[in-house]
Amino acid sequence: MTILPLQAATLAYKIRNSLYLNITNRCSNICIFCPKFKEYNLYGNDLLLKSEPSFEEVMSAIGEPVGIDEIVFCGFGESLLRLDLLVHIAKELKRRYNYRIRINTDGQANLVYGRNIIPDLVGLVDCISVSLNAPDAATYTRLCNTPFGADGFTGVCDFIRAAKQEIPYVIATAVNVPGVDMDKCRLLAESLGVSFRVRGFTSE
Ligand code: SF4
């Protein structure tokens, strides 16, 4: 049995066969449905970070994982805001293990960095799940409070298209907020060339 170090359930937490990594609490969006604005507890794990973890702290929290088949960058924060750390960890995980690596993201990273960051992830990341959340810019802006204005919605669509070109599996998701047309979200995702999944109100 793996003995997990102190704060392991904050930095690395297991749900079913996936190990989730919580490497920042910062976000590029401020989504109105995000549970973190009420509490940082998720399935009994306290995801509130006292400080942003280092490479060594994250690797220590991961330990020697057993009983999983994927490792997911997804906590109460946008992992791609720590792109250098994410790439460093993903490289080390690929060197040590054969687990699938997934990123759950709000899809704003190319706007944040002002460049296409997808090539940085090629060969390291097997799956990207992008929170599309809306079928149009007005709905996206209302739900996600993107600091990029109307560019935020265009940006998430462009990010999905760019990821689809270079990452083995890309999926768009939407939180099932009352009044948001999931069928339209699905149609948009399919028009961007990716599959679609409706999500509940958890960061998973
Ligand atoms: S839903 Fe995700 S992107 Fe939106 S505020 Fe919460 S953690 Fe950040």
Image (cartoon, helix red, strand yellow):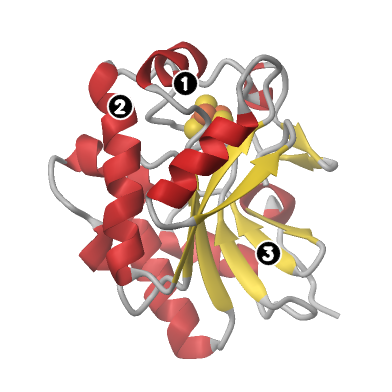
| Element type at mark 3 | strand
Query: CA–CA distance between discs 1 and 3?
Result: 26 Å
Residue under label 3, please give it: 19
Total number of numbered discs in the rendering: 3
Give the foreground label among 1 and 3. Answer: 1
Query: CA–CA distance between discs 2 and 3?
Result: 29 Å
* Number of other residues with Cα within 10 Å of mark 2, as a class: few under 14, some 14 to 19, many 20 or more: many
Which of the two labelled residues, at mark 1 and mark 2, occupies the earlier sequence position? 1
Query: CA–CA distance between discs 1 and 2?
Result: 9 Å
Q: Residue at x 79, y 72 (%)?
A: 3
Which of the two labelled residues, at mark 2 and mark 3, occupies the earlier sequence position? 3
130 and 113: which one is in front? 130
Give the foreground label among 2 and 3. Answer: 2
Residue under label 2, please give it: 152
53 and 74: which one is in front? 74
Q: Residue at x 37, y 69 (%)?
A: 167
Residue 18: which quarter of the image? bottom right
Are circles 1 and 3 on residues that touch, CB within 8 Å? no
* Number of other residues with Cα within 10 Å of mark 1, as a class: few under 14, some 14 to 19, many 20 or more: many
Which x, y percent locates residue 35?
Answer: 69, 25
Residue under label 1, please give it: 144
Q: Residue at x 27, y 44 (%)?
A: 158
Name the kind of residue labelled 2 in the image. Gly
Q: Residue at x 43, y 62 (%)?
A: 55
Are circles 1 and 2 on residues that touch, CB within 8 Å? yes
Left or right of 147: which side holds 71? right
Visible residue check, residue 41: yes
Residue 125 position (above or below residue 55): below
